[in-house]
Image (spheres, grey):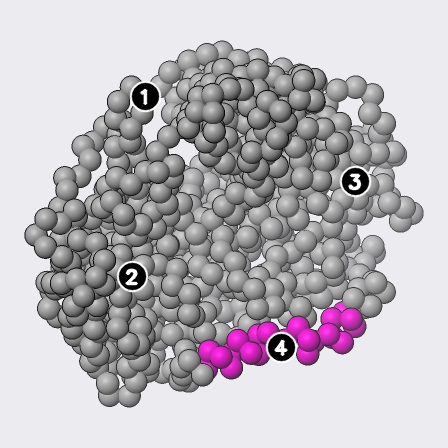
Amino acid sequence: MKHTTGSVVRAWWMSRRMVFCRPLTGLVVWSVACGLVQGVANADHKISFRQITRTHPIAVQRGQTARVRVWSNFTLNNSHSTFFIPAGVRMTQLKEPAKKVEFSEPQELDQGEDYGFSVEVPKGQLPGVYEYRIATDQAVSSVGHLMVTDYPVVTENAGDNHTTATAQLVPIPSAVCGNIDDFEDVDLYRIHGRAGQELVCQIFAQRVTRAIHCMAIQYPKIHLMDSYLTLRDSRGRVVAENDNHVGGDAMLRCRLPASGDYILEVRDSRYAGDPRYVYCVEISEGPTAIATFPLSVQRGHATSALVVETQPENVPRGGPDMVRRVRWNVSTDVPVGWRRVRVAGADGRPGPVVPQLVSRHRQVIADGKNNSVDKALPLQLPVGVNGRFQRAGQTHFYRFTATAQSVTRIDVQSRRRGLAVDSVVVVMDGKGEILATADDGDFTKDAGLYFRAPADGDYVIGVRDLNRRAGDLFIYHLSVEPSGEDFEIHGEYYYGMLAPGGHAAWFVRLKRLNGFNGPVEILVDRLPKGVTCEPVVIPAGFTHCALVFSAAVKAPINASLVRVRGRARLPRPGGEVSVERHANVLGELRRAGASRFVRMPIQSQLLGVTRPLDLHGVTATPSQLTLKRGGTARLSVRIKRSPEYSEQVLLNMALLFFNNAVGQQLPPGVSVQGEATKKLTGDALEAVFTLRASDSAKSVARWPIAVVARVPITYTIMTSYASNPVFLTVGGTAAVGTRAAPKSP
C-alpha cells in the first residue's frame, strides 16, 4: 500500500540527498586520502571478516526444525560451526552448490549472497532473541540474530500483500516473519477475530537487527527500522495503533469490538525501507505477561510475585494491571544474577518469559508512597528495591546511612530488561543539596553511579523516569550496596582469525574504580583447539594490555566462543577478597547516520583457526626487547603475503578505527616514534617501528605485545593479523609486571 504521506516523505528525502550525503562523501574522500581503500574495489583475492546482513525468516518455533537464509557480504562457503547465546539452538549449513566468491568492495546497500541453514530448536528452549555467530574455514562472522518463538511461524508471501484486497491471511496465534524491503513498503495481514477477543500484536524489529554491522540505508542514513503497527476493522477504521513499546519496536493490545476480519498494517514510522528491515510480529490472544513484580528474589527464599499483564488499550482501566500471583522458591544453588523465567499462562499453558534477578541480598518492594523526601523509604544496605511508576511525574526516594569516605554502588535496571524506565538518579544530603547525579550508563538508558560519602550521616537517593512517564512497563530494580575499590574489564575486539602457525591479537581495557590500583590477572577461557594465549597480569598503574594468541602448526580448523575475564584481590572491611569480573564486549564501530559511528554491546567473542589467509605470516624481531627510560629500541616487522594478495597492508601497535585508537597495548610512557602507521604497498614487505620510553615510563618485565597487520576490506572493515609475541622490558630489573598473580578464589 503506497501512502500519499510516504510519497511526501520520500520526496523530502530526495530533495535533501545532497545534504545528507556530504558527510559520507567527505569520509570516503578522507579514507582514500589515507590509503584505506586503495585497490579494494578490484581485489583479486581478499579473505575477510564475514559481515552478516540479515536472516530470514528471523524466527523459528521452539521444538521445530526449519530452514533459514543468511545473507553475508562475504562468502559463507564451508561453514563448519555456529554458536548461539544463550546456547541450545543448533544451526548447520545446507548442502548447496558453493557460491562464486567475489571479493569486490560491498556497496552501502549491498545485501551480499544468501546461504541456506537448517535450524533446530529444542522443545525446552526459552523463547526470545538469540545472538549467533558462524565460523567458516576462511573466517568468522559478525553477529546475527535469530528469534525463538512459541508460535507457528508464517512467512510473508512473495507476492503482493500491500492492499486490503491482497492482505495475507494469518492465524491466531502465529509469528509472522517478513521485511519492509523498500521505501513506502507497507505489509498487510488479515486476521479473523471474534467479539471481545483480546488481541496482542508485538513486533520484533530493532531487537533482531540491533547488532548488525554497518547497517545503514540512504536518504538519510538510517540504521534501524522504527516500526509502527495499526489494526483496522473491515471498514478501515482504526481499532488500535502503537509506535514505541520497547525501543522502536511496537506493540498493540486491544479488545476486538466485533467478530470478523481485521487488517494489521506493518510499516516503518518514517516510511523507510530496506531488505535488511526484517521483522517478526507475534500475534496472540491476550492478556500477555510483561514482567513480574517484584522483579527480584533473594536466593534461598520463597517470594510471592504479581504478574504484570498487558491490558487492552481501547478499554477503560477498571482495575489494577496486576491480576494474578505466582510464587517463586529459589534454592541456594541457583546462580546469582539476572535470568529469564517462564510465567505460567492464565489458562495453565506455558506463558511468556520474563526477566528475574536472583540476589544474595534482601529484597524489598516500594509501594509508591515514597514520593517525597520526607517519605523516603529507609534502606539497610546491602539491599535490592523493586519500584514501579504508576502515576506520571513521580520520583521515588530512599534513605540510607553512610560513613565518611565510604563508597556505595547505586544501580538501576529497567531498559536492560526490556522495560520502559529511562532512569535518572540523584543523591542528596540531609539538607536536600544534590551531591551526585547520573543519567545514562555505558550503552544503556539505565542509570548508575558510585557515591563516596563526604561525611558521616544520612543520604537520600531519588529515582525518576527522565520524561516523568508512568504505566505498565515502568518497572525498575534499584540495587544499593556498599562498595569500595573495584574494576571493570572491557574487550575491545570481538572476533579474530589465525591460521595454523599464525597469530592474532585482542585488546583489553581495564577501568579502575574507586581508587583501585592493584594488579589484575587477565584470564582467557574456551580457546579453540591448538590455540594458546600469552598470560598477562596488568600491573599497578596500567589500564590496558594485548592478548596475543598463537596457533600451533598442526592446529585443526575450528572455532570457539572465547571468554575474557579479570581477577584481582580487593580490600573489603573483613579483609582482602578475590573478585572476578567478566569482560564487557562491544561490537565493531558502525555508521548510525550521516557520519556518526556507534558501537553495540554484544555477548560473544569468537576466535577461529582458519586456512591460510591473505597474509601467511607476520614476523617481528627481536622477540625480546629491552627499553631504558629515555631510550629507544627498534622493532623490525616482515610480512609474508598470500600469492593472490598484493594490496596494501597497514601495520600498527594499536587497534585503530581511522585515527582513533580504541585498543592499546604499549605500557604507559612507551610510544611509537615517528609515524604510528606503516603502509606496505607494492613489493614492500618490511617496516621498522622505533619504540621510545619516556623518562617517567613505568617499569615492566616481559610484557607481551604484537604488531597488528590490517588488510582493508572497506573503509570501515579491516581484517587483522598479528605478529609473534614480543616480550618487552622497560626499566630496571625490579619490574612490577613480575608480581605474582592473584590466587584463585
Q: Which mark is residue 611?
A: none
Name the secondary structure under disc 2. Answer: strand
The mark lying in front, picked from 4 and 2, is 4
Question: Of tags 2 and 3, which is closer to the observer?
Answer: 2
* Magenta residues (range): 10-32
**Tag 2: residue type?**
Met
Sequence-wise first label, 2 or 3: 3
Q: Residue furthest bottom?
A: 682
Q: Nearer the viewer, residue 712 or 553?
A: 712
Q: Which callout, 4 or 1, points at the residue further toward the start of the chain?
A: 4
Q: Which comes before the other along the chain, label 3 or label 4?
A: 4
- Mark 1 or mark 3, which is nearer the start of the sequence? 3
Q: Which residue is mark 3?
A: 192
Please, what is the three-letter code of the amino acid marked with disc 3?
His
Q: Is residue 570 above or below residue 655?
A: above
Element on which disc 3 rests? strand
